[in-house]
Amino acid sequence: MLKIKNLYSSINNTLIIKNLNLKINNGEIHILMGPNGSGKSTLSYIITGKPKYKINKGKIIFCKKIINTLSPDKISKLGIFLSFQNPIEIDGITMFNFFKNIKKKNNLKKIYKLCKILNIDKKDLYRFFNLGFSGGEKKKNEILQMLILKPKFIILDEIDSGLDIDTIKLLFKIIKHYLKNNPKCSLLIITHNTNIIKYIIPNRVHIIYNGSIILSGNSELIYRIEKNGYYSLIKKKHNDK
Amino acid sequence: MNKNIKKSLKKNKYNYGFYTKIKSKTFPLGLNSKIIKRISKIKNEPEWMTTLRLKSYYYWKKNKKKYPEWANLQYKKLNFNKISYFSGIKNKKDKRIIKTFDKLGLPINKRNNTVSIDYVFDSISINTTYNKILKKHGIIFCSISEAIIKYQKLIKKYLGSVVPYYDNFYSSLNTAVFSDGSFCYIPKGIKCPIDLSTYFRINNGKIGQFERTLIIVDEGGSVSYLEGCTAPIRQNNQLHAAVVELIALKNSKIKYSTVQNWYPGDKNGKGGIYNFVTKRGICKKKSKISWIQVETGSSVTWKYPSCILEGDNSIGEFRSISLSKNYQQIDTGSKMIHIGKNTSSLIISKGISTNYSKNTYRGLVKICKSAKNSKNYTQCDSLLIGNKCSTYTYPNIISMNKTSKIEHESTISKIEEEQIFYCNQRGISKEKAMAIIVSGFSYNIITKLPLEFALEAKELLNIELENSVG
Ligand SMILES: Nc1ncnc2c1ncn2[C@@H]1O[C@H](COP(=O)(O)OP(=O)(O)OP(=O)(O)O)[C@@H](O)[C@H]1O
Ligand SMILES: [Mg+2]
C-alpha cells in the first residue's frame, strides 16, 4: 500500500528526515515510536503533502502511484487520512457544517449514529469546529471524520495522548471494528505509549531516531523499549555498526 | 442567486457588468442652476423642493474647496463638470428594462411573497412591486420622487432632518441633484409583514447616481429594509453619492441591510464605482436601528452608517463585513452619538483584505454628558490574505460622563496555513478552505441578514474570494 524509499526531506532548509525507508502492506498495522523531536509528525506531514515540507530525495509511493508532488487535498482524496496530533480550531463554522464540507453526501442521521458510537454529545455538532473542545474531545472528532471519510490508509499521530483509559479503549475498539470491515485498510500509529499493545496488535514496530528508522521488529520490540528506553537501543545499534 | 451569474462570476468576471442599450434622456455634462431646475421640473416637483435643491447647490458651490480628503483613500479627484446629473429612460415599460432585471436575477414581474422591491435604473425608479398588500396596512413604499409629490407633509418634515444639506460635501451635492431612491413610511404600531427592498442599477456610462432614501417608522412600528446595487463594467470611474436617512420614532425598530456589489474596477484597478455615501439614522425613545452591510464592490468606498441615539434607552447597531480585493479601497465604519440616557450601541466590523487592496475601519463613539449609563461595545477584526494588502483601524472614542462604559476590541489575523492544511487533509481544496474560514470569520454578521439575503451574501463572498485567491 505505502512504500517510502530513501526519503530525505527538509523544512526551512533544515534536513529533518534522512534516508527513511518504510513499507506497509495492505491490511497491516504498524507502530512508529521514537523520542520527542525525532521526526514522527514531520513524516506524517510529508506523506500527506503539507506545503513547505520539501522532499529533497526519495519517493513516496501510495497504491503504486508516486505522490511526492501531489497537493494535500488530492492526497486526501486518494484515501490517506491523518489524525492530527494537535487538531486546529475554526471559529464560526459548526462541526456539522464542516462535516458537510468534507463529504457532501453526509446526512444528519448518519452523523448522529456515528456520534452515538463515539459517545459524542449531539449538541456538540452545533458548536464551532473544535473551539473550546477538550483535548480528548478533539481526538474523538478526528476519529469521527475518519469514519466519515472511509480512508484506505490511516495515520494516527498520538491519538492516545491525553486520553482517559475508557476513551482509549473505545477509540481502539472503533478503529479495530473499522479495520475488520475494511480488511485492506492499513494503519500507521504514532505513539509514545508502550501500553498500546494492550489495545491493538501491530504487524510491525519501528523506531525512528533523528529522522531515520533505525530499528524495526515485531511487537516484541515494544517490550524492549519499555524495559530499556530508546537510548540503549539506539546505542546498541550504533555499536553494531 | 441567478445561475448564469454564478457561473460567470466563477470565471473571474464581474457578471453584472453588462450594458443595456436603451433610449433615455440624458442631461448634458456639468452642473449649474439650470440643470438643477431641469431635474426638478422633469420630476414635477413642488416649488419648495426646487428651492431646497438650489439652496443646497449654492451651498455646495461655495464650499467646493472643502473637498473631503481626510479619508485613507487615494484616487483621482473627480471632475464634477464631466458628469451628467440625470439620465432617465423614456419608457418605463420598455421590455429591455424587464430583461435587464431578469438578467440580474431580480425579475420584476415574478411575484415574490417575502419581499417588495423598488427598482431604480440610473436616475429613476422603474417599478415598485407588491404595493397592494402594503397599502392594506397603511404602509407607504414608493420612489422618493413620487413621495415628494404625494406625501409632502412627511417629506417636508423629515427630508434632511437627519442629514441636512450642509452636513458634508456630498450631502450638499446630493440634496441639490438627487435623482431617485426609495421612500418608506410605516404607520403607528404596524410591523411591516414583508421585507422592503430597493435595487440600484447604474447603466449609463457618464451619469452620477445620486440616490436618496428616506425611511420613517412611526411609534411602535418595525421594518426590515434591503438595499442592493450593481453597475456595468467601464474603464472610467463613476460616482454614486447617496444619502440615506432613517427615522425611528418611539419604540420602533429599523433593520437596514445592504449587499453592495458595485463594479469594483478591473485587476489593475482601472474603472469602477466611487461610492460616497452618507447614511444616518435617528433613534427616539426606546427605538432601535440596526445597520448591516456586506461590502464587496466599488473601487473606492467611503461610508459610515451612523446612529444618533437621541431618545432614552435607544439602541444603535452596526455590523459590517467588507471584502476588498485587487486595488479596491474601502474606508468604512460607523458613528454612534449617544445623547439619551441608558443608550447602548454595538459596532462589529470585519474586514477581509486580499491582493493589493486597502481596508480601513474608521469609527466614532461619542457619549455626551447627558447620556448617563450608556454603553458601547466595539469589535474590529481584520483578516489578511496574502502580504500585499493592508488594513487600518481608526477608532475615535469620546466619553463625557463617568457612568458610561465603552469597550473596544480589535484583532488582526492572517489565515493560518495550519487551518488550510487541515482542511486540505480532509479533501477540501485550498480555495474552498479559504471560503470556509472566511465564512466562519463573517458568521456573526451574515447570520443577522434576512435569510434570502444571507444566502446571497455568503455566496457572493465565497465567489469573490475564490476569484481573488484562485
Ligand atoms: N517549521 C519547522 N522549522 C524548523 N524545524 C522544524 C519545523 N517543524 C519541525 N521542526 C523540527 O523537526 C523535528 C521533528 O519534529 P516532529 O514534530 O516531527 O517531532 P515528533 O517526532 O513528532 O516529536 P513529538 O514526539 O514531540 O511529537 C524537531 O526537531 C522540530 O523542532
Ligand atoms: Mg509529533
Image (cartoon, rainbow, N blue to C red):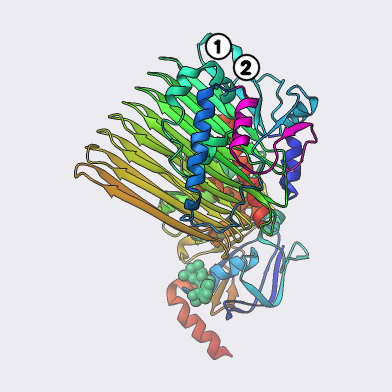
Marks 1 & 2 on one chain: yes
Q: Measure the C-alpha gap from mark 1 to mark 2.
A: 9 Å
Residue B305 x %, y %? 46, 40
Q: Is mark 2 within 8 Å of ligand 1?
A: no
The amino acid type found where label 2 is placed reads Tyr
Residue bearing mark 1:
B135
The amino acid type found where label 1 is placed reads Lys
Q: Identify which residue, A93 or A168, lies in the foreground.
A: A93
Residue B32 included in the magenta stretch of the image: yes
**Apparent side of residue B28 relative to residue B405 in the rendered image (left or right):** right
Q: Is residue A74 visible?
A: yes
Residue B396 included in the magenta stretch of the image: no
Give the residue at the far left of this rendering.
Answer: B402
Could you say whether the residue bearing mark 2 is in a helix, strand or loop? loop
Number of numbered markers: 2
**Apparent side of residue A58 relative to residue B442 in the rendered image (left or right):** right
Could you say whether the residue bearing mark 1 is in a helix, strand or loop? helix
Q: Point out which mark residue B397 bears.
A: none
Q: Identify which residue, B229 or A114, lies in the foreground.
A: B229
In the image, what residue occupies the spot 56% across and 70% down? A42
Residue B420 x %, y %? 58, 57
Magenta-drawn segment: B17-44
Q: Point out which mark residue B130 bears.
A: 2
